[in-house]
Amino acid sequence: MATNRNRNRTRRSTGKRARTTAHAEPSHSKVKDEKSVIKLPASITVKNLSEMIGVSSIDIIKNLMRNGIMANINQVIDFDMAATLVTGFGFDVAAEKRPSSATSTKRKRSRHFMEDDPILLKPRPPVVTIMGHVDHGKTKLLDAVRKANVAATEAGEITQHIGAYQVEVHGQKITFLDTPGHEAFTTMRARGAQVTDIAVLVVAADDGVMPQTIEAIAHARAADVPIVVAINKIDKPEANPQRVQQQLADHGVVIEEWGGNVICVPVSAKKKEGIDVLLENILIVAEMEELKANPDRRAVGVVIEAQLDKNRGPVATVLIEAGTLKVSDPFVVGDTWGKVKAIFNDKGKHLRKAEPSCPAEILGMDSVPQAGDILTVTNTEKEAHTLAMKRHEQKKAERNAAKQISLSNLFSQMSEGEVKELNIVLKTDVQGSIDPIKTSLERLNTEAVKVNILHADSGSITEGDVLLALASKGIIIGFNAHPEMGAVKLADREGVDMRSYDIIYHIVDDVEKAMKGLLEPTYVDVVEGRAEVRAVFTTKAGTVAGTYIIEGKITRGSMVRVLRKGANIYNSSVSSLKRFRDDVKEVTSGFECGIGVEGFTAFEQGDIIESYVKKAK
Ligand code: GDP
């Protein structure tokens, strides 16, 4: 223990190390052809970029929106963003003048705001999430970190649980997200808000690498977030840190002692040992990452927690990403807005302002925002209000733009240049099936699209798997692997393509066909409207249901099913649709109409006639 601590200290004081990151290998498959080369300046307006590359400003703005940036035509965008766009439009990029900071070599985190001129950027504290297998001590470690810092807390302050907290080590701050585990991490990421800079992977020394450890590694990698390993419970007699290190290496996390580049710190959350070394090492990784933000601009932040407090009204904890949030600032957050009435820190202390990476509990919102919503300070309250409305629309557009990949739409998205790799989460019944499937799938790689197995493991398909696929725009392939109920629901709600197979050949065949655009689409029923039967009439033309449209619309000729007490009793189509005596094409909600259903006469009061269309998945 002691030697390890000393060694880490020495390393910190010399500060000379290779980049300490466990980033995923970048997996770009570049299609080289005769493209025009665009020379980009350090920053450029949307309008000028549009003129430079001959792509309409609207298309550029649409693409920016897809990247989570709301821009107008005079907006200045930075080199990196412009380069991403320009490459996406099929050009090659040459730098006229690269920005001087190291941002261009940094991993691309989805940002919700224009990056500032590098000169204005100042170092900011790292934001850390603790991940790992259940019972390996994540909560205990979060607690130990908080308590190790108790000396820095002023007397009389009581720690509040606001979703994140900050500690101070040698005068430098570290922000910890208070929700351990990769589920919260990936949920935020799936919503387009990645706030974590560093993942601490907790592995119990007496238990070793377990399924959720492997999942956590996959999640951190998919997000391109560096990992610091904390081998916990070293106080236990049966602790075996060497075995953990070996197991981690087997999963591609090679620690420094083993010749890799991942920092590993032995700790005991229970005995509060090794915590200071862990914190120091987090700071080292943070230094390597050169985390920066401009504090002198209007604040932008991400909501990490929000609720309605019966005394204080809507309350949200916001992690400031850039700028400084002050009391009285007007702001828009998600599709709500407000004016900062008060700011509290994680110790319940009133703050006048909150700087980058600071978790701030704020009051003064019109309604409760959602975790993952972006807060942006505006000029005036009126602007905030107007923006809130616009954001509502934008959110809708973003949801549509962020279309999940499915095997059915893969080819069209490839053709539009939107997809260069097919991310797959693979779950099998037994470990032995993983390799053959992986190898056969990877053999399908082409110039245009690369198969990328994000995560492969045996066991049932969990919500975590769906979240990973969702956040990485991937699909899930199950081979004799049963999906859990929660996973089915989530995949359905978020439109994640989840497919089950029992023959390897069929997996390979489907993926290959999808890559060539030859896969037959699968269809799902999408409900268009519902009508409630209020009376039954028999006319010359047959039996007709007198109905009231309670939802959506009913169209003449559309497919319908008759539901009685929730059960589907008949499938057919609309044979006649009348308003009073007139034949009509469609009737929308709030109106009464007469509906005839082909081949069905046994209507009863209270039946529901549901119309639907078949849509390709
Ligand atoms: P989580 O599920 O990862 O959040 O795990 P917890 O923090 O709830 O810890 C699980 C159990 O392990 C609890 O009973 C803790 O008291 C215990 N535990 C956590 N850290 C240590 C440790 O360093 N040493 C020992 N002996 N027990 C620990």
Image (cartoon, grey):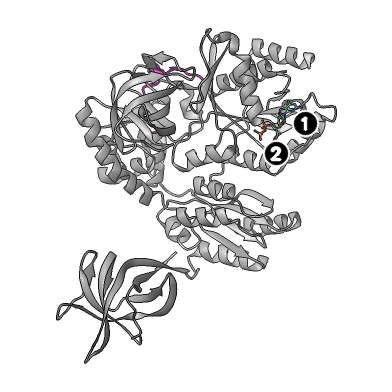
Badge 1 is on which residue?
205
Q: How crowded is mark 2: few (under 14 residues within 10 Å), some or many (20 or more)?
A: few
Q: What stretch is highlighted in magenta?
A: 111-125
Q: Quadrant of ligand 1?
A: top right
The residue furthest left is 581
Give the prevailing secondary structure in the magenta stretch: loop
The amino acid at mark 1 is Ala
Element under disc 1: loop
Q: Nearer the viewer, residue 195 or 472?
A: 195
Is 117 a magenta residue? yes
Q: Is residue 72 visible?
A: no
Q: Residue at x 44, y 42 (%)?
A: 191
The residue at label 2 has a CB less than 8 Å from ligand 1: no
Q: In this view, does 165 lie to the left or right of 438?
A: left
Q: Work out which quarter of the rendered image holds the N terminus and state it.
A: top right
The amino acid at mark 2 is Gly
Instruction: Give the mark nearest the N terminus, 1 or 2.
Output: 1
Label for residue 575? none
Is 374 a magenta residue? no
The residue furthest right is 237
Q: Which of 412 and 123 is in front in this view?
A: 123
x, y (%) of residue 501?
63, 65
Q: Residue at x 28, y 45 (%)?
A: 393
x, y (%) of residue 139?
63, 29
Q: Which residue is drawn at 48% across and 65% down?
A: 517
Q: State which quadrant residue 40 falls in.
A: top left
Q: Nearer the viewer, mark 1 or mark 2?
A: 1
x, y (%) of residue 192?
44, 40
Residue 332's place in the image compared with 215, above or below, is above
Q: State which quadrant residue 224 falls in.
A: top right
Q: Is residue 414 visible?
A: yes
Badge 2 is on which residue?
252
